[in-house]
Image: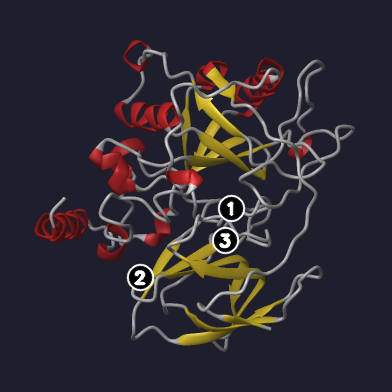
């Protein structure tokens, strides 16, 4: 694509944001091809036509189908997702105090956090308080878990990390704000993609029956559960099914005729992404779940045109029976560290 066409495309996306009430910066936050992170990131790499399927795929998919039938296949929109905000040269730089008992650093310094930034509200039963900030000029991102702004305007988080937007979207030493090392806004669905009719990257998902013993590539960390325990949220794993290690890549059968399933147009967009790019297991959660960029990131809810003003959207649970687990590499031991980065000092 010629440079002039790139500029025109970006301006057109910005205009769409203005007309829809969506934050302009949220419409133009990615590269001209519409994707975050490096072109060669696993998140941005289509699944090869000859990709091998794991021999244990049927036993793992049986658990996925059970979870989807028991609790639905949700897409988090207003709760249990990640609001994304954007920084510029005028954004105040702040110190973020880190409070988790397992933390390996005490603070992150020089973090741009806009005044309007608010962490995800979670639900009445608790919150993960996720939030992300993107500084496009510096090419940096900042991710937060259980973020909180105090009455005096100071910020704290149980954990936070940072890194380059030109990276893979996976923290090399784990220690992201998700269990698997995937950056917390990696693999989210964006409204501009739904409007455009295509998602050109892999998605990330949460699931109750995660496997202990460490992650599989490309994940770099894991909080998989012992096989003797029920799934997260108390969901029992049926006999004969197998848990899935974090980092596993699942694909919707690419031969499946999506036009014959009676899917809504937006559901078809998501399903097509699952055929071409698949989804990586990134979190232990109470149900089978994908996520969209938190609706509060925008001036008005851009998802209302697709599924109404609801906290969650849903895919048909029966769609899960057409998933397959791609061949799994060996599980790796957890060796976590905070990777160096020019984006902010962590001390």
Secondary structure category for the residue under label 1: loop
Of pointers 1 and 3, the one earlier in the residue sequence: 3
- In-image side of 82 versus 231 (left or right): left
- In-image side of 268 versus 152 (left or right): left
Location of residue 100 with respect to 265 vertically, above or below: below
Q: Looking at the image, is mark 3 or mark 2 nearer the viewer?
A: 2
Location of residue 330 with respect to 101 vertically, above or below: above
Q: Number of callouts in the render?
A: 3
Q: Residue at x 63, y 60 (%)?
A: 177
Which of the pair 316/269 is nearer the observer? 269
Picture disc at residue 182: 1
Quarter location, residue 199:
top left
Q: How is the image coloured?
A: secondary structure
- In-image side of 323 versus 102 (left or right): left
Answer yes or no: do the residues labelled 1 and 3 have beta carbons within 8 Å?
Answer: no
Mark 3, residue position: 130
Mark 2, residue position: 136
Tell me the distance, in whole angstroms, between the alpha carbons under discs 3 and 2. 20 Å
Residue 333 in the image, given as x and y percentages of width and height: 80, 49
């Amino acid at each position: 694509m010629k440079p002039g066409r790139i500029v025109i495309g970006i301006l057109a996306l910005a205009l769409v944001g203005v007309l829809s009430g969506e934050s302009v910066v949220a419409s133009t936050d990615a590269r001209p091809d519409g994707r975050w992170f490096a072109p060669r990131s696993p998140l941005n790499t289509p699944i090869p036509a000859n990709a091998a399927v794991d021999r244990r795929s049927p036993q793992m998919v049986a658990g996925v189908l059970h979870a989807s039938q028991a609790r639905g296949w949700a897409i988090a929109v207003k709760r249990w997702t990640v609001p994304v905000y954007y920084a510029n040269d005028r954004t105040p730089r702040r110190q973020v105090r880190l409070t988790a008992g397992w933390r390996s650093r005490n603070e992150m310094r020089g973090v741009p956090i806009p005044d309007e930034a608010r962490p995800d509200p979670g639900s009445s039963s608790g919150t993960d308080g996720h939030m992300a900030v993107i500084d496009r000029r510096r090419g940096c991102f900042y991710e937060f878990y259980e973020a909180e702004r105090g009455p005096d305007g100071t910020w704290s988080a149980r954990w936070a990390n940072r890194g380059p937007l030109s990276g893979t979207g996976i923290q090399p030493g784990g220690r992201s704000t998700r269990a698997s090392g995937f950056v917390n806004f990696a693999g989210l669905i964006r409204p501009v993609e739904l409007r455009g009719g295509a998602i050109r990257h892999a998605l990330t998902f949460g699931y109750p029956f995660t496997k202990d013993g460490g992650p599989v590539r490309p994940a770099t960390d894991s909080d998989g559960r012992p096989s003797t325990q029920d799934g997260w949220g108390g969901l029992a794993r049926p006999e004969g099914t197998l848990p899935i290690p974090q980092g596993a890549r699942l694909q919707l059968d690419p031969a499946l005729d999506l036009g014959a399933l009676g899917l809504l147009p937006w559901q078809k967009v998501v399903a097509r992404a699952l055929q071409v790019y698949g989804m990586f297991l990134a979190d232990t959660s109470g149900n089978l779940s994908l996520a969209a960029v938190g609706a509060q990131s925008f001036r008005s809810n851009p998802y209302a045109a697709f599924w109404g003003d609801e906290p969650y959207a849903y895919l048909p649970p029966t769609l899960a029976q057409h998933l397959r687990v791609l061949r799994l590499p060996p599980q790796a031991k957890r060796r976590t560290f905070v990777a160096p980065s020019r984006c902010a000092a962590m001390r």
